[in-house]
Image (spheres, helix red, strand yellow):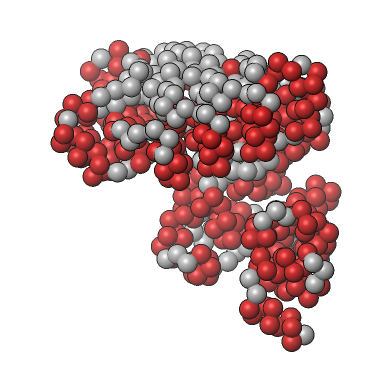
Amino acid sequence: MYLARNLMNMTTIPTLVESAREGNAEAFEVLVARFRDNAQARAYAVLGDHHLAEDAVQEAFTEAFLTLDKLRDPAAFPGWFKRIVIKRIDRLIRGKKLPMTSLDAASNAASHDGPDLGMDEAERQTWCQDALEFLPDHEREIAKSYYLEARAQKDIAAEYGLPVTTIKKRLYSSRQRLKKTLRYLDPGSDASDGPSRLPISAQLFSAASNGFPSRVQQLIDADPDLVRLHDEDGVSILLYAAHASYRTGNTRVTDLLVAKGAPIDFLGAAALGMRDVAAAHLRAAPGRVHSSGAWGRTALHWASVAGQDLMVDWLLAMGAHANAVDRWGCTPLHVAAEFGRLSTVQLLTRNGADATVRLRNGKTALHMAAQSGHFGVVEELLRHNAEIDVFAATSLGWEETVRRMLRDDPFLAKASLPYGATPLHIAAEDGQLKMAEFLVDAGAELDIVCAAELGWTDTVKDLLAKGPEAANTTSGSFGFTALHTATAKGRRDLARLLLAGGAQVNALDKMYQKTPLGEALYFGNEAMAKLLFEHGAQA
C-alpha cells in the first residue's frame, strides 16, 4: 500500500504504463485510481445508470490491461483509454437501446437555444455524441468535460491551465459548431417547402462526411449494397469516409463500413494503412503503385493525407512518384502539408518531394500549411526551398510582415493567383478578419465573393444593387461564385439572398468544376443541399 501511495504521488503516467507493461500490478492499480472517476463520470453522463456505467468502466480497464502492450506511446495513455471507454459505452448503447442524458439539458446552464431536429430523443443524442467527436482538437475535450461529465468551468480551466474566459469562449464556439452540424443533417430545419429528402446516396455521403456512424448504419441496414457505393467522381463511400476522418482522427464510420463488408481496393488500403491488403493488390497488378484513381490521386496521395508514414515509406520503396499530381495539380506533399502531417512531410521531402510545385490555383505546399495554421510544417518547408510571400504571410496572420511587404511594393495588395485570389480573398477564406480589415484600408478591392466569405451581408446587398452580373462573378482561391462561397460556409440566409439576386444555381467553379450543390454535398450540409435542390440545382 505504501508503494502504491508513492506511485500515486510521484510517478508520471508514462512510467506507470511502462511499469504495468512489465507486470507491476500496483502500477496498473494506480492508473485505475487516477482514471476511474473521470471514466465513471463520462459513462454515467451518457448511460444515465450507475450500474451500467460501472460495467462499462470495468470492461474498459480490463481491455486496457489486456492490450496495454499495443499502446505505442505511453504518454498517450489518457486519450487511448478514453477511446476504450467510449467504445464500451457505445456497445452498451447499441446492445440495450438505452435512453441517454440530453446534451442540451447538460448545457442549459449556458444556453436554452438547443437544436430541434424533429427526431426521437435517442437518435438526437446519438448524433450529438458523434458530433462531439468531430469538434476541433482544442474544443473537443473541453466540450466533453462540460457537456458529458457536467464538470464546472473553473475545474476545466484548472485542468488545462487556461483562464475561465477562454473555457467559456471555447464552449460557446463548440456549441455553435454542434448546432450548425446538427442543422446540416436535417433538411426539415429549412423553412422552405418542397421535397422532404435528398436521394439516399446523398444522405449516405452526407452522414459519412459528418462522421455519424449511427446514421450510416441506419442507411446500410436498409440497403446493404450501399457499402459499394461510389460518387460521381468515382470515390467509394469507404474512401470518402476515410477522407472525412483525416482532420479528427475519428474512424468510427470507416470501421463500421469495413465491418459491413465495404470493398477495400488499393487506394482504400493505402488510406487505411493496410499494408498487407495493399501488397496483395500490388502483387496482382504491380503498375498500380503509379496509377491514379478517384480525384486523380495515387495511393501515395491517400497514404500521405492520412499520415500513414509506414505506408508512405513502403510505397516510396515500391517506386511511387513523390511528385505525382492529381487532377488539380496537388502532390502528396500538398495534402500532407494541408493536414499538418509533419513526419509525413519530412519523409516526402527526404525522398525528393518538391516544395515549389504549385496547384492549378497557384498555391504551394507552404500555402496549404499556412492556411491550416500548421506552423511546424511551415518551418519544415522553409528548409526545402519554400518561400514566404504575401499570400502565405496573410494566411499566417503576420500583419507586420504584410505591412512591410506593402510598403516595399504597394501593388501587392492587388496581386492575384490564377483564379483571382488576392491577399484579401486569402484573409477572408482563412478567417483572418483583422487582416482583411487592414487590407481593405490598404486599398484592396472587396468583391462579392470576398464579402460572402466574410459574411458581410450588407456589402453583398450593396454589390447586388449595382448590377445583377455581380452575383455570378468568380474569384478567390477556387474561382468560386458568391453562391459557392455561401454554400461552403453554410450560410443559407446569404444563399437565399444571392439566389433572389440572380445567382446561377448551377454555375461551375474554376478549380473543381463543381456546382454549389456539389459543395453542399461535399461538406455534408443536407439543409443547404435541399435549399439548392429546390432551386433546380445539379451536383
The answer to which of 123 and 409 lies nearer the viewer is 409
Q: Is residue 131 above or below residue 76?
A: above
25 sits left or right of 416 in the view: right
| Position of the C terminus by quadrant | top right
Report x, y in % for residue 413: 22, 29
Residue 168: % across, % down = 45, 59
User: Residue 431 lies in what quarter of the image?
Assistant: top left
- Quadrant of the rendered image containing residue 384: top left
The image position of residue 303, as x and y in percent, is 63, 32
Q: Is residue 460 left or right of residue 268?
A: left
Residue 506 appears anywhere in the view: yes
Which of the 4 image quadrants contains residue 50? Answer: bottom right
Q: If the image is split into quadrants, where does the N terminus sit? A: bottom right
Residue drawn 75% across and 33% down?
A: 275
Q: How many marks?
A: 0
Across and down, in percent, residue 106 comes to 59, 59
Residue pictured at 32% horizontal, 29% vertical: 425
Near-viewer residue (71 or 153):
71
Q: Residue visible at 31% across and 38% down?
A: 393
